[in-house]
Structures are given as C-alpha cells and as structure tokens.
Amino acid sequence: MKVPTRTQDRGFAFNITPLIDVVFLLIIFFLVASHFIRHEHVERIELPLASEAREDDDSPNRLVVTIVASGEISIATTTITPEEFEQRLQVLIAKQGVAATELRIRADRSVRYSNVEPMLITAAKNGVTKVRFAVLKP
C-alpha cells in the first residue's frame, strides 16, 4: 500500500540568491573604486596657510594645476609646459564655456610668484575669471 505524501503549502517565498549576488558585486565594485581613488597619484606639496580658507565643492568644470617646489607644472600627474597649459585650458573652455570654467592652482608654499603669474595671465587672456588657490587653514 502506498503511503500518501502530504505536501505542505508554505505560501509565497522569495528566492534571494540573485539579490545576494548583486549586493556582493556592488560591494566589490565600491571597494575597488575607492581603492583607485585613494591611490590616485597626487603630487605631495606643502600648501600655503590662509586664515580665511573655505572648503569648496568639487566642480567638473575645474582644471586643477599643481606647481611643485622646483617650479614644474603638472595636471593630473602629467608634467606640462605653459603652452600645453593654455591648450588644455582652451579645450576646457570650448567644452564647458568661459563662465563655467574654473582654475584651481595648487602651488607649494615655496614656489615663487614668477612661476604662478604666467598661468594667471593665460587664464585672464582666455576670459577665465574663477581662479582659486588651494590653501590650508592654520
């Protein structure tokens, strides 16, 4: 004689295995992305101190130029000449427009003004009026 099997209806159940896979993939993505952001090579410089320093939000229209103590100019770890700086500034102006373009200068505190002045003149010549210096609060 066959014993009757009773299947108990447990109601509606979610299969959360794909959800767990997606969550783990997102965690791995953000860990890798944060690793690259933290280890992005930025030239270490000693910024000048300013009593009226304020924090600014990061703008996608900002061109960040770094001037090291030796006077070398670089943009995103690439050493450039003043002529290349003007070309990159003009490319950014062509993409974003003059009103939206901002120049951020990260200069070492021991850099002479004669190394910074050509960039300021180039920015003014191209119509860029938003020029800011990266500084530290004392």
Image (cartoon, rainbow, N blue to C red):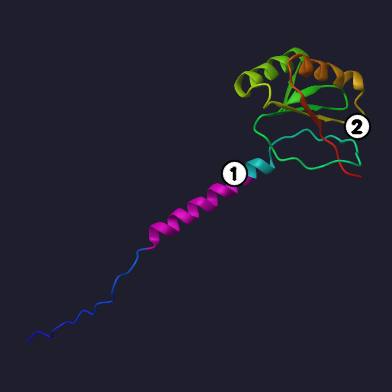
Question: Which label number is shown at residue 109?
Answer: 2
Q: Which residues fall within the magenta stretch?
A: 16-34
Residue that lies at the very extreme toward the front in this rendered image: 99
- How many numbered marks appear? 2
Q: Which amino acid, by three-letter code, is at mark 1?
A: Ala
Residue 75: which quarter of the image?
A: top right
Q: Which amino acid, by three-letter code, is at mark 2?
A: Arg
Instruction: Say which element carries label 2.
Output: loop
**Does residue 117 lie above or below 7 as drawn?**
above
Question: Which label number is shown at residue 25?
Answer: none
Using residue 15 as the reference point, say whether residue 132 is left or right of it.
right
Q: Residues within 10 Å of mark 2 (few under 14, many from 20)?
A: some
Instruction: Say which element carries label 1.
Output: helix
Residue closest to the eye, 89 or 115: 89
**Does residue 9 lie above or below 55 as drawn?**
below
**Does residue 99 lie above or below 25 as drawn?**
above
Q: Residue at x 48, y 51 (%)?
A: 25
Residue 50 screen position, x and y as percent? 90, 39
Magenta stretch: dominant secondary structure: helix
Q: Residue at x 82, y 42 (%)?
A: 54
Using residue 90 as the reference point, say whether residue 116 is left or right of it.
right
Q: Report if the CB atoms under discs 1 and 2 are less than 8 Å apart.
A: no
Residue 98 screen position, x and y as percent? 68, 21
Q: Quadrant of the N terminus?
A: bottom left
31 magenta-colored: yes
Residue position marked by numbered label 1 in the rendering = 33
Alpha-carbon span between mark 1 and mark 2 = 32 Å
Q: Disc 1 or 2, which lies upstream in sequence?
A: 1
**Mark 1 vs mark 2: in front:** 2
Q: Residues within 10 Å of mark 1 (few under 14, many from 20)?
A: few
